[in-house]
Image: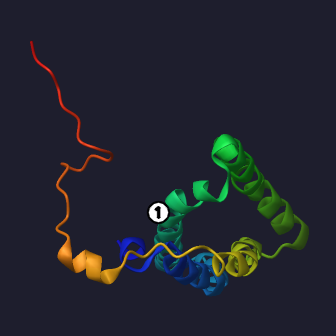
Amino acid sequence: MMADRVGRRPALVVFAALSLVLPVSMFAFMSRGHGLLALTGAVVLALVAGGVSAVGASCAPEQFPVAGRLSGLAVATTIFGGLTPYAAQALIDGTGWRLVPGIMVAAVPLLSLPILWRLPETARDRSALSKEPPADRGGLEGPPTSTASG
């Protein structure tokens, strides 16, 4: 809803800023050995990650040409999603520092923010929002379809 109201770019910038400042402290909470602190850290990070995923799911594919869109997403997902847990574990084992995953999570928005600032704005004109009633499609995406009987 936030991205629909203010646009993808501002929403992603907000979530990137949260992803930059929260992970190290949340991983510190989770590594203290107290269940409530671990739960708090995990829930806060899950809320931020959920926001990033919700907005990023529609924004990320647009960054690749249509012909190679799925290949681009597959490569990016493999690199960031597939190798990251192994790299985090190797760094924890090598350094003994449990906050390494928080640093890794914070590094991504640090590198991404300059790119996010340059994304095209997607917020719709606010005057159009107030004049146009929302279409009711029963929760389905795409144009309504008709069924023929007979």
In the rendered image, the residue lying farthest to the right is 94
> In the image, what residue occupies the spot 88% across and 73% down?
95
Residue at the outermost top position: 150
Tell me which amino acid carries mark 1: Ala
Picture quadrant of residue 106: bottom right
In this rendered view, identify the residue nearer to me: 88 or 108: 108
Say which residue appears at 57% left-offset and 81% top-offset.
13
Viewer-closest of 40 and 65: 65
Residue 105 shown left or right of residue 56 in the figure:
right
Q: Quadrant of the N terminus?
A: bottom left
Q: Nearer the viewer, residue 40 or 122?
A: 122
Q: Relative to 69, does residue 27 appear above or below in the rendering?
A: below
Coordinates of residue 6 in the picture (x, y in percent)? 41, 80
Please tell me which residue is depicted at 27% across the width and 76% down the height of the picture: 128
Q: Secondary structure at mark 1?
A: helix
The image quadrant of residue 120 is bottom right
Residue 99 image position (x, y, % from top left): 73, 77
- Mark 1 crowdedness (10 Å alpha carbons): few <14, some 14-19, many ≥20: some
Give the residue at mark 1. 54
Numbered marks: total? 1
Quadrant where the image shows the C terminus: top left
